[in-house]
Structures are given as structure tokens and as C-alpha cells.
Image (spheres, rainbow, N blue to C red):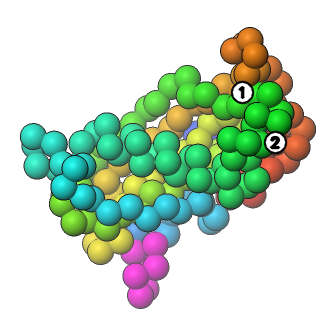
């Protein structure tokens, strides 16, 4: 349960202190954790919606891309999950859209695990615009680890727990 408190407390204090990602020094970005996985993205014409900014659906897709790329970097791509006959699936997205991202904006999508236990993982996201340090969106995604044959939740394999340990990112 300490992991859950860490997951929620860090974000709560960051919001209260207005300390979510900001520019520090020479274009260095400070995230809510020390070692997030980062995925650069650029807003392209196909990302723009009728309100002339990146669609909320596109922002969610970037978060998903970052989660998949982070998992692969940790050694767990689709093939690795197939060998385990288990995988993570999203159960819930909680996204705060804070500012619009406009055509041509270069963004950083940061992600990290903040809670991992039994068959559940919580993943945080922060999307920021390095040019001005503005936060575009933040999110908490809740994932379930499921058996690929039955689709039912199962305990996370020990080696996956070790690779995804939230203490690696704080």
C-alpha cells in the first residue's frame, strides 16, 4: 500500500505546489519523478481536430505509445508477453487536459510506473511542451495483468514485477 500512497502523494503535492514539469536552466525539463521514460512527439496535421488543436484521442494514443515503448525498453515487447502468456490491458484512463497542443508543437510524453501489486499496475503520464515548459496533459492509467488464454486477471510474474518496480523511476 506504500506504493499507492507514493503514487498519489507525489502527484498531489506536485499539484498543490504547482511543481509539475517546468523548465529549469537551459531547456532542461523537470518531471514529477527523476527517471521517467520519455517519448518525443510532434503535432502533425492529422492530429488536429475541429477545435484546431491536437485531439484528445491523439493525446491518449501518445500515452499508449509511450507505455508500449517503455515496456519494450524494459524488455517486455509483444513477443515477451506472448512467451509469458500474460499481458497488461488498460482498465481505466484518468486524463486531465490542461492546455491545447497546436500544429507543429514538439512535445515530450513522459511515463512511469507508480504502483505495482498482485495483478494491478498504475502508470502516470505527463505531456509537456519543452519550448515553454507548459503542461499539456497529465494522466493516471490503471492496468490489469491478464492471462492471454482466459482474459482473467492473474498475478504479475516476478520478473515483470522486478523490471517494472516503481522505485526505479522516483
Q: Is residue 17 magenta?
A: no
Residue 47, how many percent across, how many down?
Answer: 24, 49
Q: Circle 2 sits on which residue? A: 160
Can residue 66 be seen in this snapshot? yes
Q: Are marks 1 and 2 in contact (CB under 8 Å)?
A: yes
Q: Position of residue 77 (x, y in %)?
A: 69, 47
Q: What x and y, as percent, mark residue 119?
A: 75, 25
Q: Is residue 154 left or right of residue 77?
A: right
**Depicted 7 relative to depicted 38: above or below:** above
Q: In the rendered image, which quarter is residue 85 located in? A: top right
Q: Nearer the viewer, residue 150 or 145?
A: 150
Q: Residues within 10 Å of mark 2 (few under 14, many from 20)?
A: some
Which contiguous range is marked in magenta? 23-29
**Residue at image point 24% right, 58% down:** 44
In the picture, measured across the screen, residue 106 lies left or right of residue 3, that is left
Q: Which residue is mark 1?
A: 145
Q: Earlier in the sequence, mark 1 or mark 2?
A: 1
Secondary structure beneath label 1 = strand
Provide the secondary structure element on which disc 2 rests. Answer: helix
Amino acid at each position: 500500500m506504500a506504493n499507492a500512497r507514493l503514487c498519489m502523494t507525489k502527484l498531489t503535492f506536485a499539484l498543490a505546489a504547482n511543481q509539475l514539469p517546468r523548465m529549469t536552466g537551459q531547456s532542461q525539463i523537470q518531471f514529477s519523478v527523476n527517471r521517467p521514460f520519455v517519448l518525443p512527439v510532434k503535432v502533425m496535421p492529422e492530429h488536429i481536430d475541429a477545435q484546431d488543436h491536437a485531439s484528445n484521442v491523439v493525446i491518449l494514443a501518445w500515452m499508449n505509445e509511450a507505455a508500449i515503448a517503455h515496456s519494450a525498453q524494459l524488455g517486455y515487447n509483444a513477443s515477451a508477453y506472448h512467451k509469458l502468456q500474460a499481458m497488461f490491458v488498460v482498465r481505466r484512463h484518468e486524463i486531465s487536459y490542461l492546455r491545447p497542443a497546436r500544429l507543429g508543437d514538439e512535445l515530450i510524453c513522459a511515463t512511469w510506473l507508480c504502483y505495482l501489486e498482485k495483478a494491478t499496475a498504475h502508470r502516470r503520464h505527463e505531456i509537456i511542451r519543452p519550448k515553454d515548459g507548459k503542461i499539456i496533459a497529465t494522466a493516471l492509467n490503471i492496468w490489469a495483468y491478464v492471462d492471454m488464454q482466459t482474459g482473467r486477471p492473474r498475478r504479475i510474474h516476478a520478473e515483470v514485477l522486478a523490471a517494472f518496480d516503481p522505485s526505479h523511476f522516483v
